[in-house]
Amino acid sequence: MRVALMVTCINDALFPDTGKAVVTLLRRLGVDVEFPAEQGCCGQPMVNTGYLDEAVPVVRNFARSFAGYDAVVTPSGSCAGSVRHQHGIVAKRAGDTELATAVAEISPRTYELSEFLVDVLGVVDVGAYFPHTVAYHPTCHSLRMLGVGDRPTRLLEAVRGLRLVDLPDADQCCGFGGTFALKNADTSVAMGSDKARHAVESGAEVLVAGDNSCLMHIGGLLSRQRSGVRVMHLADVLASTEAAS
Amino acid sequence: MTGTFLGMPPFPEAARAALADTQLRRNLAHATATIRAKRNAVVAEVAEWEDLRLAGAAIKDEVLLNLDTYLVQLEQSLVAAGATVHWARDATDACRVVAQVAKAHGVDEVVKVKSMATQEIELNEALAAEGISAWETDLAELIVQLGDDLPSHILVPAIHRNRAEIREIFRSRMAGAGRAAPDDLSDEPADLAAAARLHLREKFLRAKVGVSGANFAIADSGTLVVVESEGNGRMCLTLPEVLVTVVGIEKVLPSYADLDVFLQLLPRSSTGERMNPYTSMWTGVTPGDGPQEVHVVLLDNGRTRALADDIGRQALRCIRCSACLNVCPVYERTGGHAYGSVYPGPIGAILNPLLKGPGLDAQTDSLPYASSLCGACFEACPVRIDIPTVLVDLRAQVVDAHRSSSGHRRLPKPEALAIKVAGWSLARGDRLSAAARMTGLGSRVASRVLSRRLPGGRPAITRLPGPGARWTGARDLPLPPAESFRAWWRRTGGGR
């Protein structure tokens, strides 16, 4: 099985350790993941802001970069959601049937990390060790667009040393929302402040989620409020072992 | 006289003002959490809920795709049952019909059932201009009307008011509109309701003309349906001699049997009840029983525009339950006024632009962006309106409307320029790599002058200039690391 890592632009530039964690984790599970170097963005920032024409070359590059792989795995529910639900819309806009075919080919084989681990590899215990109290925030696109369900929490529950605590109002949006965080910054911060408060109330040392974009927002608030709670991507937790810690 | 939404600022600005009102935020958080819990409990009881949602969506879609046929059938049924049918292209047409009926009977007042369609067309204001008082009889609408206020929720329009405020409105304003509130009025809900009952009873008994909307209009029988909780609707629909009903053309259902689906979906989604207290149905004129002159105004007012929109059309399935408002994290924090329309919340964010069209005014154009696209609305919608997908499509319509006007391209806004730059650099790996090298370079310089650290140890950016300040106003940002993932992969061959 040829597996490609779609690292996502936010992880590439801001959270490269999460990309490395996915590589470490997948190799440990016997998957020799490749990184197609020509890959760029999934196009979601353009699509969700209304710039469909500008998204066309981005989606075209995605389809070209990942053509021929059996699976594309990405540490982001939001970017996986964009590939699966928006690339078809962009291809239709472009009126490019070749692109539409390419998109239809690769979209269903694009998986968010927890989906890939549980559904494709069939593992729940990935051999991780993380001796901390953790609360899990289900990000909206992983929860509602992809329907990852309890896959992430099953993975976390199997981590040795990890204590999973409830996050109050867990399924409420954190308020990141891509360009929403800037276009409606006040509302975004109001939503995020409640999420940050719930993270503190949960008693967790670490707030975990499957999207670094949401975590950048929640973590930015937790940091500004000097709460002491830190945020970590699911991949970073699952890659941790006794040897590494 | 009620207030007007005319001239409201775009959503971000209106939201900022609402967010600063901490009492409002507490009221809304409490009210929406309560109604969410009620809804979840009664929805969970219905094993076939998802099938009901599918059925509701399918019935509405079938109607919308054959609306021309169903509307003509509805008109024929209504006329056969003794009603007079009026077709209204827009708000002005519809208001004129109601005013003409009132004037024909020489009245200077009408009593009203709570109705979104009449709010939408600003009927009360139009009638006031003709010297006719339109009395709202729903308790919450009465509070809004007496307070010269604006509705902030589809189902509970005074959700932004607490009981102390309501007592004050009743004490200071009721006397000017009819029977005064008692001097010793307390802020106990039962006392407030009793004062409203006495005040309204006079109006019910006096009024010659009633005005309503309708939740459903049955094409094959001409039966109109109003679903309500307080019984004020039943009074307005049965006591006056003349009844005028304003119905959006999307409210048609093929036959009585279809109510089976919608009378299960609506109360559970709306008030979180298994069944609403009052469901009134009438079919034209029944000799000797109820209004002897019945008018029905079939209202377009932008609905055919929405119908022509391939993706947005589904918004016309809406049964005005307001479940999407109650689950929306944006609505919960900003309240309804920030949306600048009688249709607030997620449904308002799509319905208003669909009825009016993109590119006409900044307020309407701001609405599709008033969402984090979390998808909670779609999950709660009893007729499965995929609101996030419609929002994203409307955003594209807003951008497209601004791309070109009168044949030449407008100068790019900073946002359009930023998206173009981002699109160019994010489209390909080599360009992204160049961009990452630049941020990495900046980071090495910046890390020397930054002292704040995020929990976990990474250096933090706490202040950005320009538009970046919208982020750092309340949020720290991790400093980009010196080496991007792709640079690391290239340097180490994937860490091997």
Image (cartoon, coloured by chain):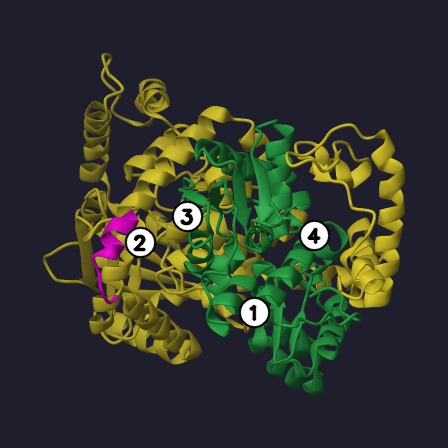
Chain colours: A green, B yellow
Please identify the dominant SS of the magenta region: helix
- Residue A83 in the image: above or below residue B367: below
Residue to which mark 1 is pinned: A111
Residue B71 visible? The answer is no
Q: Residue at x 72, y 38 (%)?
A: B458
The residues bearing labels 3 and 1 have C-alpha atoms spaced at a distance of 28 Å
Q: Nearer the viewer, mark 4 or mark 3?
A: 4
Identity, as a three-letter code, of the amino acid under mark 3: Val
Tell me, yes or no, whether dots 2 and 1 are on the same chain.
no
Q: Residues within 10 Å of mark 3 (few under 14, many from 20)?
A: many
Quadrant position of residue A184: top right
| Cβ atoms at labels 3 and 1 below 8 Å apart | no
Chain letter for mark 1:
A
- Residue A207 in the image: above or below residue A125: above
The residues bearing labels 2 and 4 have C-alpha atoms spaced at a distance of 44 Å
Q: Residues within 10 Å of mark 4 (few under 14, many from 20)?
A: some
- Relative image position of residue A162 (x, y in whole percent): 46, 45
Tell me the number on the disc at residue B327.
Answer: 3
Identity, as a three-letter code, of the amino acid under mark 4: Asp
Q: Residue at x 89, y 51 (%)?
A: B438
Tell me the number on the disc at residue B269.
Answer: 2
